[in-house]
Image: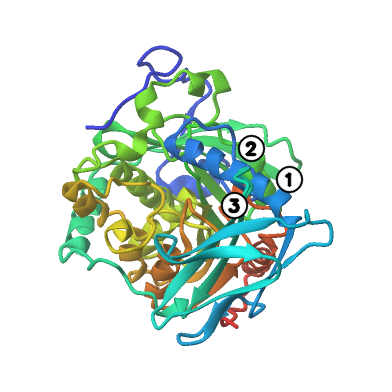
Amino acid sequence: MYPRFPLNGSRQTPERKTVRRLPPLNSLQSERIIAGPAATSFPYCLPPMKSPLARISTALLSLALAAVAAAQDLALTPLKSTSIYAMGEKAGWTVAPAANAPAGAKYRYSLRKNDSQVIQTGVIDGAATIEAVLNEPAMLYLDIAPESGDGKHIAAGAAVAPTQLKPSTPRPKDFDAFWAEKIKMLEAIPAEPVVTPGDSGREGVEYATIRLNNIAGSHVYGQIAKPAREGKFPAMLILQWAGGPYPLQKPWVVDRAAEGWLTLNIEAHDVPGNLPQEFYDALPQIIKAYNSLYDDDRGRNYFLRMYLGAYRAADYLAARPDWNGKILVATGTSMGGQQSFAVSGLHPKITHMIVHVPAGADSNGGLHGRLSGYPNWDSSRPKVMETALYFDTVNFASRIKAVSLVSMGFLDEVCPPAGIWTAFNQIPGRKEVVPLPTAAHNHQSTPEQQRAYTERSGKWFKALANGAEPDVRPLK
């Protein structure tokens, strides 16, 4: 059903002489074995990728770097410091030439609603004000380029009543029944955890790699770390961004374990996460275009195995006797955030969700005047659009009981903010949004542009590691 990929050039599994199987749960307490992957440090740079997302991201990053040079020629100031406006309010920016701007330089601009529909164009010659009044919830995306056509662009973003953004397409009536059936199918397959203890490289931390059974003969691969002491710990499930596959980095779990977390970090794909880069480079091209595999078949869609893998990983953490039974966080960036939405909506024991610029929202937005982002499902094919709704984060959000922290970049064209706001708005419980008005996608933005998320997520993780509930702040 799913593409399978050979290990070390063959279909055989890795050598078993260093592998130990976990005992039954009732004897786990006396075993010092740990298994599974762990948390990430939310790096700003992704590893080299050859996926469609990577190609899009590379092009957008080139534009972003060019914008730096152009931005030195113009100064943009939002009419409101938050860049968030009410319906009927003037939204926009004042524009002024910088002190060192070329004399007589002119710029063309376009203002797009939801980064899709052009609602205004014009020429900037000297100082100007660019503004619009909207009577509907939407995102605004401003693109400015020199008339000279040298390719240097400046971008700015704003939000109009974003907490009122609604799904562009109704949720499938059988959405819940579909996922209940798939979870039942997964639960009929024994997890059979296989762990390989390893060196954490850090005193006071235990580390291992892990393999769990998944549907259709596939597996969940990852790494796990925990404090090297007896006790019960808060648990963190870290889910990976798009691309690759690529190897998991040991510090992503070890550093979190040093902070007191039982941390599991899993591959999004059916490949081990601890092999040399050459292994991943040699994988068949088909897996590097995974986002389009079975994109018109909900029963075989690539994201079905991925989401169920996250569910199995959460199940594994929740069954461990060294979990404290109180805090189980799903977290990730981009496609890791997408998986976090799915597992938080599906698994009843996820207590908190912390996600940065999550992918997978508003899959049908392109049919309704909104820019749709990754996984970039083909909006020209009706069956693909119908299938996408079963994997859309917007449709998982209403099921989420976890206390949630969600960020979005107003300039993000990989995971557009209109979709993320829409998904966030569907979460019924306690939640906090972190708008990033000057940020694009995570690895296309500077640490300063993402500082608000870095600071808020850091405070959430610190509180949870200490057994406290985070301070959930309202949108200002």
The quadrant in which residue 207 appears is top right
Residue found at x 68% / y 60%: 449
Pointer 3 residue: 442
Check disc 3 and give the amino acid type.
Answer: Asn
Q: Is residue 245 left or right of residue 455?
A: left
- Name the spot of residue 61 as percent of width and height, x first: 60, 43
The quadrant of the rendering that contains the C terminus is bottom right
Quick one: SS at disc 1?
loop
Pointer 1 residue: 204
Please rate how many residues cluster around mark 1, counting C-alpha atoms within 10 Å: few if below 14, some from 14 to 19, many from 20.
Answer: few
**Residue 290 in sight in this render:** yes
Please rate how many residues cluster around mark 3, counting C-alpha atoms within 10 Å: few if below 14, some from 14 to 19, many from 20.
Answer: many
Farthest residue, direction right? 99
CA distance separating discs 1 and 3? 32 Å
Quick one: SS at disc 2?
loop
- Name the spot of residue 32 as percent of width and height, x first: 58, 42
Check disc 2 and give the amino acid type.
Answer: Lys
CA distance separating discs 1 and 2? 15 Å
